[in-house]
Image: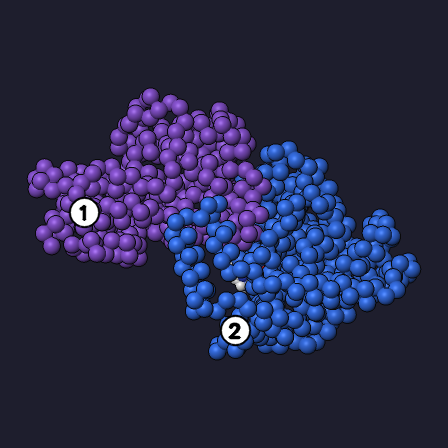
Amino acid sequence: MPRTVLEPRFQVEYLSILDSDGNLDTALEPKLSDDELRALYRAMVLGRRLDERMVRLQRQGRIGTFAPIKGQEASQLGSVFTLRPTDWMVPSFRETAAMIRRGWPIEKLLLFFAGYLEGGQPAPDQHDLPVTIPVATQLPHAVGLAYAVQYRGDDAVVMVYFGDGATSEGDFHEALNFAGVWQVPVVFVCQNNQWAISVPLKKQTHSKTIAQKALAYGVPGLQVDGNDVLAVHAAAREAVDRARAGDGPTLIECVTYRLGVHTTADDPTKYRSEEEVRAWERKDPLTRFRAYLEKKTLLEDGLEQRVDADIAAAVARFEAMGPPDPLTLFDHLYAELPPHLAEQRAELERRLRAGAAPAAPAPETPPSATPMRGQRLTRR
Amino acid sequence: MARLNMVKALNLALAQEMERDRDVLILGEDVGVDGGVFRVTDDLQRTFGSQRVIDSPLAEAAIIGTAVGMALYGLKPVCEIQFSGFAFQCFHQVENHAARYRLRTQGRFHCQMVIRMPYGGGVRALEHHTESEEQFYAHIPGLKMVIPSGPRNARALLASAIRDPDPVVFFEAKALYHAAKEEVPDEPETFPIGKARVVSEGRDLTLVAYGAMARVALEAAEQVRAEDGAEAEVIDLLTISPLDRETIVRSVAKTGRAVVVHEAARSFGPGAEIAASIMEGAFLSLEAPVRRVTANDVAFVGFAREKAHVPDAARVVAAVRETLAF
Ligand SMILES: Cc1ncc(C[n+]2csc(CCOP(=O)(O)OP(=O)(O)O)c2C)c(N)n1
Ligand SMILES: [Mg+2]
């Protein structure tokens, strides 16, 4: 018997609408209202400026380690803007801009990055999971949520975020496979920012694209210019509509770049060149979207100042919060406090009362060994 | 009342809980059409449909991971891991997420889910099909760990586990699946999680055991009663975590002597925690050191040599006699 070619043959599309030189493909331009465009830009500016502010807060020891988003604003916001509040958003650990769009108060996120679990509590009506640290492990959760949505017959879509490094984890493949088999309403958004800490994409995978990995699971995969907020929005819109219509999952690969450090404990000069960073700075998602809005005369005067004032107000609210009671530590392990935890709680209470253990705020003296490079004592 | 073996008793619990609550789903490898490799989920897919009894793809991490997502939404998945030896493939989802979601979100979300898995020796099977590794789960804050010892308590505890708002790892001793039949009430029955049972009273020594070893401990207690005239009180833990320290300590305060029996390896096993709890709670009553009768600290031995590895009544009797003579 001769070898035959099996159908279907695969192809992977790449979508770009507004390139870094400002060229616009008007045929593909998404139909967003002026208000939507302004809101999108405002969210991007907020994402960028909050990120810069948070790096300073970390350096000053006012919050702990966190993962900056600089450069990835378009990937996060272009996609999350296609969701309704009743849809579900499942972040990894680098989605600050998207999380704010979903309604997480800035001061709550700051509280989270200052090391308090209270900052990770979604509001009662919020359909959002909190930050997930173990890489790729949130992907199956999104698929399970989507299964539950379908099982209950609800009208909701689940959007889940992860990085390029995450696509090497088994959980990524298992989640895509389950989603494909179950045909559930989930949109996988990969922010391919070219690096997983110090490991570049070419050492992460031999595939030409990440998008194509979906095809093996019978799931559509699309690569987009992740620094082009219009392209990301268009791609996400298509995927969300598909999911909502009951036509199953999609993987979107946003080709973008992490302009900053991996986390505030990282020093990227160890593994990548200045030239590479500068080349990507020329593709900055904010610059080109700003130029696009300028042409449409949609730029708001004093936007940056207003955003900064909002951030300053949120930082002030964060710093005005008293440190939460250490005894609440035991409150949410189980629905009911089991006897051994009641005992340990009482023990801590006695220690706190006796002053043997430092009650919050933390001691003023810096810890003798810094836990991670770049990490400082959190002064709260 | 019907006389059921443990497989049928577990099946009854699943069927009744699914009947009772539409949010209860079953998810796992071969659980649907095949009814599970041990037939615990037999016929349930026929009754409840393939949306509720899901033959999942073969991937433990995604079975638990998607179940976590379902639970966050408010469903109550019951996952089957085909053998506990394969649960390492999903251990991160259990430890990182199922056990922590309530804490991480400060009560906004939680994972009401059950993770069932067969464990332990006695079925002449290959590596990864005979181990007893409950210590890994018992060690995880936020999880509950239940191990029944017979058809009636298996049925009642599984129903409780499904209704429990916290994630429960539920170990089923393979050696017990077909070992005995018991009268099991037709009406749904639950047993409290976190409560041990004194299954045989005595004043000379306390035997603490669970799962397949509960029967071994009872057998040993009967033998010393008949041959030595000594009365051993036997505690069947039923829940490993949270541990019912109160029942253990109360018993040892009375008897002054204790022997712990488990099929897990000795070092850092549940016996160590039980012995420490006895030291903390009943030190002044102790007449002898707490003894442990356990498997060796050997990863696996092959079923042909299981007798040299898994505790049996003779080993327990010997430990009891030494403890009484101390
Ligand atoms: C399972 C797991 N392994 C390792 C880590 C440590 N770690 C944190 S982020 C990271 C790289 C992630 O790369 P990528 O998925 O590309 O996301 P990015 O950081 O670029 O957003 C690693 C190795 C982790 N958090 N989880
Ligand atoms: Mg990356």
* Rendered position, A186 above or below A170: above
Q: Nearer the viewer, residue A65 or B132?
A: A65
**Farthest residue toward the top?**
B1
Judging from the image, what is the letter of the chain drawn in blue? A
Looking at the image, which residue is at 26% across and 30% down?
B180
Name the spot of residue B69 as percent of width and height, x first: 56, 44
Give the distance between the C-alpha atoms of the residues marked 1 and 2, in whole angstroms. 48 Å
The reply to whether dot 1 and dot 2 touch (C-beta < 8 Å) is no
Instruction: Describe residue A261's horizontal placement relative to residue B13 as left or right.
Output: right
* Rendered position, B182 above or below A82: above
Name the spot of residue A189 as percent of width and height, x first: 66, 52
Name the spot of residue B325 as percent of width and height, x first: 9, 52
Quadrant (top left/top right/bottom left/bottom right) for the N terminus of chain A? top right
Looking at the image, which residue is at 11% across and 42% down?
B230
Q: The disc labelled 1 sits on which kind of residue?
A: Thr
Q: Which residue is mark 1?
A: B255
